[in-house]
RNA sequence: GCGGCCGUGGUCUAGCUGGAAGGAUACUGGCCCCCCAAGCCAGUGGUCCCGGGUUCGAAUCCCGGCGGCCGCACCA
């Protein structure tokens, strides 16, 4: 049995996750997170919030999962997620039409429609590469889930394939509510949906999954990151384009600063978030040499990105797997939404020195126009008010033709040219996007925490993502022990901890059970407790035991999760070893 | 979706040359319990993935589907 299988078995057994809808045979690509899995994911998400949002004073929003068609049309997803597929009528194999034709040496652009594809297929008599059978009619396959909003079939919507569009469509409101703080980071933790053709790899590729995304809006003219200094010497494992193009398989390690200087990473913000992502995963128990950043080449990138590094973690069964994506989206998204919605999504930039601009104002003189064209005056004024293009024409040619009969030269206008000082200019923010897959991270954490000790499983979850804080056990199931254990349990629960109480079964079995869900410590009430009011404290990872005053249990827990180290707290509190 | 392998209590599995589904473990109750899945007793739990076919009779043979793993394609 390989490790992935053991981990997945443990996860089912202990209520972390399992395939959804099992009673109906299951549906590929859907997962249910169980009681422990939900807590694990919540802890990871909370830690992510602290680490990426709160630390920088960024903000979080929650926008709908469903968006009207136009949002994803504007964002380019309708186009980008749409593939033209052809099906072999004989063996039922499906192919992407453009890839198939290109493989046959026929150069076609992705932009062609199904009808054009069909005629090219007919013309070149292309057959199925698998069985030589006749190909059917090409048709679209959209990998976004489609739905109808309200009762009208015409009102199409999509389940979002990424949360990011929410940050773009709602950008102006958030920006205003935050009193135009800039640069600004807007985050969202939520569900995304992708109708994968054939999802595999258990918890790794899902049709519905949680994402933690941050859109960092920055000024394209000032791409420096104020936090960069604190991380510039950190080393990153970069499997970057130059290495890939050379055909090498190993990543190269260099400091964040060097990567930016050598223009391997496009700017400081990208590099900063990559270092942060590395630290984040390290804290979650994934060693640095099991992480790398894999740069995506032109054809591999999403349609909106000009640079993408995938943060990958090495998993036992599947090799390098993406856990986060770091994309430089430039002004792609805001610009697209400005164009499609016609709304102002610009940000003001205050200039250090005022810019001198020569401004020409052209104001028509209605009296003069009326004198010459008394009957058409209404039409002319309407045209001049509503159209804009004539101004340039007037300056260029010295006159304009409104219709064949109506010509106005410069004498009909008051033209003023003046020099103005401008203190503020508009620009479209650029976006740096670190985007994390929560389900994948949760799985990764589980796999890296999974250890075996003397034929037993110990889930060494980092304390920061623990599912329970501690367990309280009476050594044996008897009245006196139970009473003391109960009261300790109540005290800890009241203090806000998540605590397990169990009296059944042998003590060894109970320890084994809590090891499997990674409970950091257990307090055990035993004979000595009756004599001197101390309890045994047991460490999950070493199985070492110490004596602790029962009245210090609360303090012990607080210190434990403050310093995240069992041995340190044992030393600090000068606990007596039992072994 | 294609090809290969696979599908039996929660989990792991025996049975698969057709003839009453068995074990281990887990779970529940009890006994014994003073530190790491101990032991003893009793008990619950199975549409043998689903549907169809062959047969007097199918977990077992045949066909189709669903699901899983691996390879191919896909993963924007």
Image: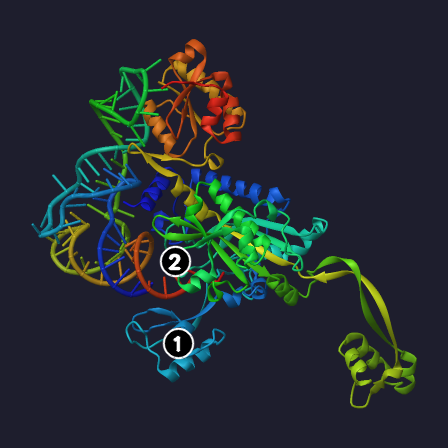
* Quadrant placement of the C terminus of chain A: top left
Q: Chain of mark 2?
A: A
Left or right, residue A350 beside residue A276: right
Q: Is residue A130 above or below residue A462?
A: below
User: Which color scheme is applied?
Assistant: rainbow
> Who is closer to the viewer here, A215 or A160?
A215
Picture coordinates of residue B74, whole percent (x, y): 41, 64
The residue that label 1 is drawn on is: A101
Left or right, residue A388 beside residue A103: right
Looking at the image, tell me whether mark 2 or mark 1 is earlier in sequence order.
1
How crowded is the residue under tag 2: few (<14 C-alpha within 10 Å), some, or many (20+)? few
Secondary structure of the residue carrying tag 2 is loop
The answer to whether residue A213 of the structure is visible from this angle is: no
Q: Chain of mark 1?
A: A
Picture coordinates of residue A300, whole percent (x, y): 46, 64
The residue that label 2 is drawn on is: A249
* Quadrant placement of the N terminus of chain A: top left
Left or right, residue B40 beside residue A285: left
Picture coordinates of residue A466, whole percent (x, y): 46, 35
- Give the spatial CA distance, label 2 vs label 1: 30 Å
Frontmost of labels 2 and 1 is: 2
Picture coordinates of residue A462, whole percent (x, y): 45, 36
> Who is closer to the viewer here, A562 or A238?
A238
> Who is closer to the viewer here, A228 or A565?
A228
Secondary structure of the residue carrying tag 1 is helix
The answer to whether residue A87 of the structure is visible from this angle is: yes
**Residue at x-position 59% and y-position 65%:** A74
| Co-location on one chain, circles 2 and 1 | yes
**Residue at x-position 37% and y-position 22%:** A503
């Amino acid at each position: 049995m390989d490790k992935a299988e053991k981990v997945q078995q443990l996860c089912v057994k202990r209520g972390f996750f399992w395939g959804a809808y099992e009673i109906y045979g299951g549906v590929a690509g859907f997962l249910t997170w169980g009681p422990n899995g939900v807590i694990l994911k919540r802890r990871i998400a909370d830690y992510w919030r602290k680490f990426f949002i709160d630390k920088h004073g960024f903000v979080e929003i929650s926008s709908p999962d469903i968006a009207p068609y136009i949002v994803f049309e504007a964002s380019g997803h309708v186009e980008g997620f749409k593939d033209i597929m052809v099906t072999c009528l004989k063996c039922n194999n499906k192919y992407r039409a453009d890839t198939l034709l290109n493989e046959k040496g026929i150069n076609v652009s992705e932009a062609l429609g199904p009808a054009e594809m069909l005629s090219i297929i007919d013309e070149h008599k292309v057959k199925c590469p698998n069985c030589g059978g006749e190909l059917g009619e090409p048709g679209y396959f959209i990998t976004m889930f489609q739905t109808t909003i309200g009762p009208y079939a015409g009102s199409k919507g999509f389940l979002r394939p990424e949360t990011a569009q929410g940050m773009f469509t709602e950008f102006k409101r958030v920006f205003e509510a935050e009193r135009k703080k800039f640069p600004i980071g807007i985050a969202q933790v939520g569900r995304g949906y992708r109708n994968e053709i054939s999802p595999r790899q258990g918890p790794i590729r899902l049709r519905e999954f949680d994402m933690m995304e941050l859109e960092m809006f920055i000024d394209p003219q000032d791409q420096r990151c104020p936090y960069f200094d604190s991380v510039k010497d950190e080393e990153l494992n970069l499997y970057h384009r130059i290495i890939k193009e050379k055909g090498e398989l190993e990543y190269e390690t260099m400091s964040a600063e060097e990567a930016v200087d050598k223009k391997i990473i496009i700017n400081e913000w990208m590099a900063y978030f990559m270092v942060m992502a590395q630290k984040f995963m390290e804290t979650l128990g994934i060693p640095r040499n099991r992480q790398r950043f894999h740069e995506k080449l032109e054809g591999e990138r999403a349609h909106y990105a000009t640079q993408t590094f995938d943060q990958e973690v090495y998993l036992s069964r599947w090799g390098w797997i993406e856990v986060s994506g770091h994309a430089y989206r430039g002004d792609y998204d805001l610009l697209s939404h400005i164009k499609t919605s016609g709304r102002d999504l610009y940000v003001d930039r205050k200039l250090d020195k005022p810019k001198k601009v020569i401004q020409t104002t052209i104001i028509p003189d209605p009296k003069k126009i009326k004198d010459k064209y008394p009957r058409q005056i209404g039409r002319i004024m309407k045209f001049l008010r509503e159209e804009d293009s004539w101004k340039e024409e007037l300056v260029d040619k010295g006159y304009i033709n409104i219709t064949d009969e109506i010509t106005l030269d410069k004498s009909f206008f008051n033209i003023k040219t003046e020099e103005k000082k401008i203190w503020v200019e508009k620009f479209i923010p650029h976006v740096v996007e670190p985007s994390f897959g929560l389900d994948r991270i949760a799985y990764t954490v589980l796999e890296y925490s999974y250890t075996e000790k003397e034929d037993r499983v110990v889930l060494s979850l980092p304390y920061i993502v623990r599912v329970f804080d501690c367990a309280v056990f009476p050594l044996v199931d008897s009245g006196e022990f139970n009473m003391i254990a109960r009261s300790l349990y109540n005290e800890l629960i009241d203090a806000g901890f998540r605590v397990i109480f169990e009296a059944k079964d042998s003590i060894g079995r109970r320890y084994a059970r809590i090891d499997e869900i990674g409970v950091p410590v257990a307090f055990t009430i035993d004979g000595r407790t009756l004599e001197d009011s101390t309890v045994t404290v047991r460490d999950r990872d070493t199985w070492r035991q110490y004596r602790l005053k029962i009245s210090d249990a609360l303090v012990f827990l607080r210190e434990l999760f403050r310093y995240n180290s069992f041995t340190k707290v044992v030393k600090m509190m000068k606990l007596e070893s039992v072994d």
